Amino acid sequence: MAFRIPTPAAILRFYLDGFRSMTLGRTLWAIILIKLFIMFAILRLFFFPDQLGGMEEAQRSDHVLEQLTILNE
């Protein structure tokens, strides 16, 4: 009996059939996707400001160099 390597289409079909038959899993995946959206889109706006915005190219490079080479005192 020869071992057959599954084609990408067979692998895709396998996963699609699995996701189609899920009931609770769909709800859990929806919750996971909503949480990821909140973490990466919404929280990024409030907690990670664009510190390099409004600077010119030379100012940006100086700022990055300064932040990378700063010594902890």
Image (cartoon, rainbow, N blue to C red):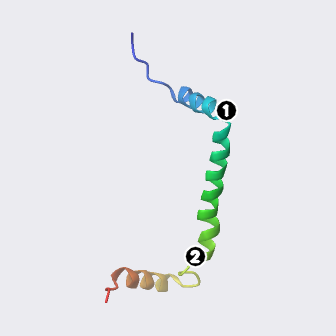
**Residue at mark 1 to residue at mark 2: CA–CA distance:** 37 Å
Q: What is the secondary structure assignment of the residue under circle 1?
A: helix
**Residue 3, horizontal then vertical, whole percent:** 40, 17
Which quadrant would residue 27 be assigned to in this image? Answer: top right
Task: Tell me if residue 17 comes above or below residue 40 in the rendering.
Answer: above
- Residue at left offset 52%, top offset 30%: 8
- Residue at left offset 58%, top offset 76%: 47
Task: Tell me if residue 6 comes above or below residue 42 in the rendering.
Answer: above
Question: Which quarter of the image is occupied by the N terminus?
Answer: top left
**Front in this rendered view, residue 39 or 53:** 39
Residue assigned mark 1: 20
**Front in this rendered view, residue 27 or 41:** 27
Which quadrant would residue 2 be assigned to in this image? Answer: top left
**Residue 4, horizontal then vertical, whole percent:** 43, 19
**Residue 57, horizontal then vertical, whole percent:** 50, 81
Residue assigned mark 2: 47
* Residue sitting at the far top: 1
Which quadrant would residue 34 be assigned to in this image? Answer: bottom right
- Circle 1 packing at 10 Å, graded few (<14), some (14-19), many (20+), is few
Residue type at tag 2? Phe
